[in-house]
Image: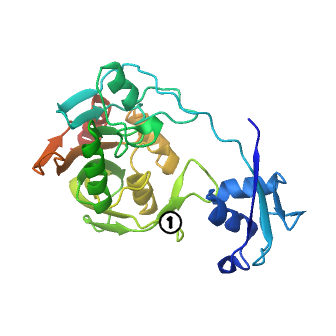
Amino acid sequence: MSTQVRSLPVPDGLEGERVDAAIARMFGFSRTKAAELAAEGKVLVDGSVAGKSDRVIAGAWLEVEMPAPPRPVEIVAEPVPGMGIVYEDDHVVVIDKPVGVAAHPSPGWTGTTVIGGLAAAGYRISTSGAAERQGIVHRLDVGTSGLMVVAKSEIAYTLLKQQFRERTVDKRYHALVQGHPDPMSGTIDAPIGRHPTHDYKWAVTAEGKPSVTHYDLVEAFRSASLLDVKLETGRTHQIRVHMAAHRHPCVGDLTYGADPTLAKRLKLERQWLHAVRLGFEHPEDGRWVEFESKYPDDLRFALDIVRGESA
C-alpha cells in the first residue's frame, strides 16, 4: 500500500517547537512515532530534511510522508473458554472476561477477543463505534480479568458511552500491590500519557490527560496490600501506571516494575488486578444495576500464599 505525503504550514502557536512535537500536534501522531518518521528522513521543512530536535518557524511548510494505513482488522468469531455471561437483555450483555483475552481485535493481536467470543455465541451487538470495536463502550487490559459491559442496542451504546464520559459508572477493581501504601487510603491525581520511550507503555507525564484513582486498603500482608480501587477516569493502564508511580506496582506487573521473584513465587503470570464490581444506570429505564465477580483461580491462589505467609 503506497504512502501519502501531507504538508501543512506551521501555525503561530507552534513557533519554536521541536519538529517531533510539531508533527505530533499537527498530524495526530504520538511523539515517539513522529521522532521515528524524522529519523527515517520522512520529514521536510520548507523542502529540506529535518531532524526530530530541529526547531520550526511559524509559516514554514512541514511535509510528512505518512505511513500506510493499517489493513482493516477482521473480527473472527471464535469461542472464548472461560468467558462468563453475568447478565444480558435486549440492550446490554455483562461479561466476566478471563485473562488473556482482548476486548476487540487490533493490529498485531492474534488471540481471542470479547467481540469474537460474543459473535461465536450468537449474540447480536450494537453496530455503533469503529468496525473492529462495535458495541464496546469500555475495555480491560488483556492481562486484567473481570467485568465488562457491551452494548447490544444502539441506544444502549449511546447512553453507556455518555455515562462513561460523565464518570457516573461505578468501576471497582481489587489490586494486590507490593508493599504498603502510605496513606492506606487515598487518591492519586496524576496525568497519564504515552511513555516517552516505549510505545507499549504509559506513564505519569505532565503532557498526559487528567487521571484520578481512589484506593482503600482491604487487607494488609507482610509483603503486599490488597486494595479496593475506584476509577474516576478511565485511561489505558491507569491503575497499573498510578500504583507503579506511587512505588507500589501491582504484584506480577513486570511491565511496570514489579518484583519478578515475588511473581515467580506466587506462580503469577500477569498483574494481580481484577474488575470486581460494575454498576451503571440501565439504558432502557435508568434503574441502577450492579454486578460482582469473584477472583479467578490464579489470583485466588496467589492471594492465599501471601495471606499464609503473613499468618
Q: Amino acid at mark 1?
A: Gly
Residue 149 or residue 132, whichever sits in front: 132
Give the quarter of the image for residue 168: bottom left
- Horizontal and vertical percent position of residue 183: 28, 68
Give the quarter of the image for residue 233: bottom left
Query: SS class of the residue under badge 1?
Result: loop
Give the quarter of the image for residue 53: bottom right
Q: Is residue 172 above or below residue 182?
A: above
Lateral position of residue 86 relative to residue 150, left or right: left
Identified at 80% across, 73% down, the residue is 60
- Horizontal and vertical percent position of residue 309: 28, 41
Identified at 81% across, 53% down, the residue is 42
Residue 123 or residue 201, whichever sits in front: 123
Q: Is residue 210 visible?
A: yes
Residue 112 or residue 250, whichever sits in front: 112
Write down the residue under mark 1. 208
Furthest residue in direction right, as rendered: 48
